Image (tube, rainbow, N blue to C red):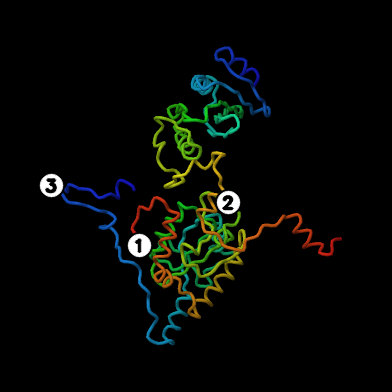
Amino acid sequence: MHELYEKLKQYYPLGELTEQRNNLAFITLKQEQLRPVLLHLRDKENYTHLVILTAVDWIEDNCFQLTYLLSNRTNATDIGLRLMIPREDATMESIHDIWPTAATYQRELREMFGIDFPDSPRVNDDFILEGWNDIPPYRRDFNTLKFSEETFAQRPGRETVDPAEHMKQKLYPDGA
Amino acid sequence: MKEELEKRIIKGPDGLEFEVEPLRDYYCEAPPTVMPAAYSKIVEDLFNWARSESIWILGFGTGCGAIEMRPLMTPRFDAYRFGVQWRPTPRQSNLFIISGYLSVKTLKRVIRSYEQMQNPKYVIGLGSCTINGGMYWDSYNTIKRLDQYLPVDLYIAGCMPRPEALLAGFADLKKLIRSGKAEGANEYAEKFEWYKANQKRVINDWDMPDYNW
């Protein structure tokens, strides 16, 4: 992984390298570097498979982290590209022309995080949430519990118990 | 609303233009009606006995509980020996098993399928999710009480209930049908407005007729 990182670094300005395992590493980079690095990895380094494109909401830093995970099938190694985009009017360049499957991930991110990918096919269509008119549910400022209590009728009488305490009571009722 | 459901002018092959309003033209809008019992109790009892012995299930798995139906269909548990079988279309079935959690998107399809089933029809809620939300109690997209949206005859609790529990559930449902207590379809017709209001409260993009059969 180190050799690959050094090699890439000759051509593109890159951030730090995080090695998770022998066959999995993450590279941080700038938004503008994503497309050339992806194309380089796909065409020259045999990372031909886009495993996943996902996002993390870093609400404290006011940004979204996007992770593009690529896989090299011949030597069974994975490499992830991480980048940060601002949270306000989050927009990212679409990569559906490099991997057509990315369109599905981008559609999901558009719906769940509200990250826009202009020109991605059907990106604004409903995916899982039909007729959603709240803020995107995977954003961390969305209060899932409150929404669920307000929207869906609840059956009274549901109680929550601490599993450890409950089992202790049940197995050793006299407190032994 | 989807484009193909909107009212529009269409030009036919013979050049004539005509207006199409899919929601009105393609579906029957008449609300469901209560089906009266047979003219005499003994005849109704006979009907109920017959109904209880041919429970035909709609093969629609809404959640993870659908996995419990496969061993039931196959020789190990073999539900067919109790007169229970699975059918591919709502028109041929009279029991709808809501197998587990129900997302809002699935609820819409479930309502359409339920309304297409012929009377008399029964609903079983399978698993905790249909009773009080189960492990999805704080989810943004799953309903928590099935009986707000469809008339439920029987719940089978568990997460997930084993196939044996389902077999016991079928036996209980048979008892209910024979005693004339499984009147879900009539209840749906009686409280139709209430059910519709509940359904429309959670389904925001309602793009189907109120009753589609």
User: Which amino acid is tagged 1?
Assistant: Tyr
Query: Residue shown at 55%/53% (left/top)?
Result: A149
Question: In the rendered structure, which disc, 1 or 2, sits on the residue that comes first in sequence?
Answer: 2
Quarter-wise, where is residue B78 in the image?
Answer: bottom right
Disc 1 crowd, CA 10 A, few/some/many (<14, 14-19, 20+): some
- Mark closer to the chain start, 3 or 1: 3
- Sequence-earlier tag: 3 or 2: 3
Circle 2 Cα neighbour tier, 10 Å, few/some/many (<14 / 14–19 / ≥20): some
Q: Position of residue B11 (x, y in %)?
A: 17, 47
Which residue is the site of mark 2?
A: B138
Q: CA distance from mark 1 to mark 2?
A: 30 Å
The CA distance from mark 3 to mark 1 is 33 Å
Gap between marks 3 and 2 measured at Cα = 55 Å
Residue of label 1:
B211
Q: Position of residue B199 (x, y in %)?
A: 43, 58
Label 3 and label 1 in one chain:
yes
Q: Position of residue A172 (x, y in %)?
A: 82, 62
Tell me the subunit letter for badge 1. B
Which quadrant holds residue A127?
top left
